Image (cartoon, rainbow, N blue to C red):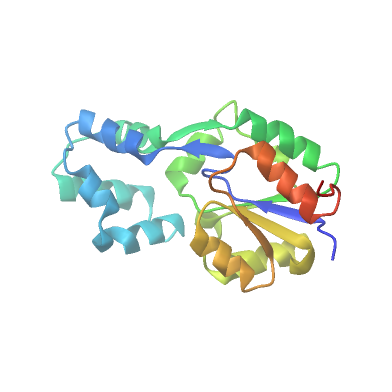
Amino acid sequence: MKIKNIIFDLGNVVLKTDITKTIQRFQEYGIANIKDLLLSEENIGLYYNFECGKVTAEYFRDYVREKTNASISNSEFDEAWNNMLLEVDSDAVKIIYALKKHFRCFLISNTNIIHYDYLRKQPYWCINLFERWLFSHQIECRKPDSRIFTLMLQLADIKPEVTVFVDDMQINIDAANLLNINTILYQDMNFAELETKILLMAHILKKI
């Protein structure tokens, strides 16, 4: 069946990110053990719940401060936390505009209230590129949970067989595949190469 829809991930697909910059910024504020805290298996559940909107920003900040014995202010915390968010890929914006001539375009993102509040105030915020979007913290569900994909399919009234999902994480790709959504793992390629891959899948371009 011909591809009609594209669902994009945000982080590391449309928006460039680098968690090492957040770790470095926290360290500059005197929190030397932030890397161990953020990347530890012990705190996976906390971060999962934060991205699902089940933990408030206040609780998240206080938890980190307690575990690190830090006296960092809320504004300093948020500035450091958001330091991983770099910029929207300018090529991505141009190419998505071009792809919209052929496809309906959507967005699914695992995020949290601190990041979301920051991003929506930035001049590069590109949410209007997409016909519909889902942010995990607003719906209490995150990838790779199948419910977030099912919800998008239902709200957008689209069929999985004519939809392609683009994400940089294999675990999310696998979850979408289980729902018969076509997928592209966005790794080791640029956005122009992604565009070509999508157009080939949709039979708009033909292999030479």
Check the image and report above or below for 154 versus 29: below
Residue 107 spot, x, y in % from top left: 65, 50
* Observer-nearest of 55 and 111: 111
| Left or right of 117 on screen, residue 163 | right
The image quarter in which residue 190 lies: top right
Residue 166 spot, x, y in % from top left: 63, 53
| Left or right of 5 on screen, residue 64 | left
Q: Residue at x 40, y 36 (%)?
A: 84
Residue 70 spot, x, y in % from top left: 16, 39
Check the image and report above or below for 195 versus 109: above
Residue 142 seen from this side: no
| Left or right of 41 on screen, residue 56 | right
Q: Residue at x 39, y 33 (%)?
A: 83
Which residue is the extreme one toward the front?
208
The image quarter in which residue 185 lies: bottom right
Residue 30 seen from this side: yes
| Left or right of 59 on screen, residue 142 | right
Q: Residue at x 28, y 59 (%)?
A: 43
Q: Residue at x 36, y 56 (%)?
A: 47
